[in-house]
Image: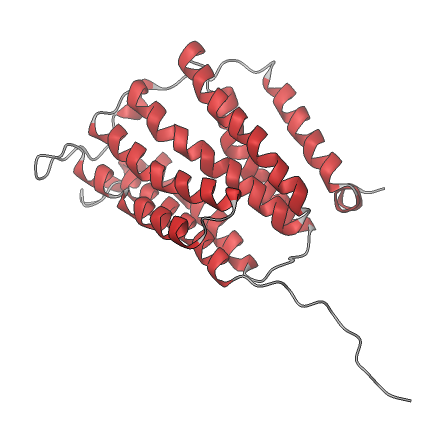
Amino acid sequence: MSISSYIRGRPIPFLYGAMIFSLVALLPLPPLLQDQHYHQFADQRELFGIPNFWNVVSNLPFIAVGLAGLRRFHRDPTTVVLFAGLFLTGLGSSYYHLAPSDGTLFWDRLPMTLCFAAILSAVVEERVDARAGSMLLAPMLGIGVFSLLLWRWTDDLRLYAWAQFFPLAVLITILSFFPPKYTGSRYWIAAAAFYVLAKAFEYFDEAIFSFGGIVSGHTLKHLAAATAGFAVLRLFEIRRPVAPMTKAFTGA
């Protein structure tokens, strides 16, 4: 049996197996420490009395998308967690950028773990199995919150890195191997692409700001990540069940 046929035939055992294997694989790795240079963002301009102005206000799209999602999709636990996470990310990231430090960074990262957990739950619900997806939400939330507590206790970010990137890897895998049950798949792809773009902007923060000192990579990271959230919002707004294929009637 090929890997692809195993994934399609036994998606839930594969998913939990991948979770367990990847978590165990973290153990022999060296601790992942927070680089203190991370807090030294390229754009530290103060405007209207607000320090790091552009890195603060570029979080407003998160708040807007989160509020729009909560207003429209507040009856399902997964969407409530997802859009509450986006809303709180806007608040937490703004708070962090007012005075960047490990202590304030905790409140930036905490709501993001809500988004990661909810996205994994949502894509499993949509493409694989609705019950299995909803059951994933609570343990993924638990792992995400615990990963940040573990970081504060031990300075080790390995588990947080897993909580961030494992859902993205699963999203790509599921989109690759499972046909859609709803329309709007392009929005999942757009969300993943914008999130990858956001990570690239984050990495090239100083290099981007060096081109004229107009905008920094980190500011663009916020805008790209919020656009990823908007793509998910649009997905839930427009998606409809895919009509089953029917055989054409030919007569006798």
Out of 127 and 158, give the one closest to the viewer: 127
Q: Is residue 129 left or right of residue 163?
A: right
Residue extending farthest to the top is 154
Out of 178 and 218, give the one closest to the viewer: 178
Q: Is residue 115 left or right of residue 208?
A: right
Residue in the image at 79% along x and 80% along y: 248
Q: Is residue 35 left or right of residue 140?
A: left
Residue extending farthest to the right is 252
Q: Position of residue 57 (x, y in %)?
A: 22, 42
Out of 99 and 28, give the one closest to the viewer: 99
Q: How is the image coloured?
A: secondary structure
Q: Position of residue 52 (x, y in %)?
A: 18, 34
- Where, by quadrant of the figure, is residue 44 drawn? top left
* Quadrant containing the C terminus in the rendered view: bottom right
- Residue 20 drawn above or below residue 213: above
- Residue 236 drawn above or below residue 226: below
Residue extending farthest to the left is 48
- Residue 234 drawn above or below residue 202: below
Q: Position of residue 131 (x, y in %)?
A: 66, 43
Out of 232 and 203, give the one closest to the viewer: 232
* Quadrant containing the N terminus in the rendered view: top right
Residue in the image at 58% along x and 62% along y: 183
Residue extending farthest to the front is 75
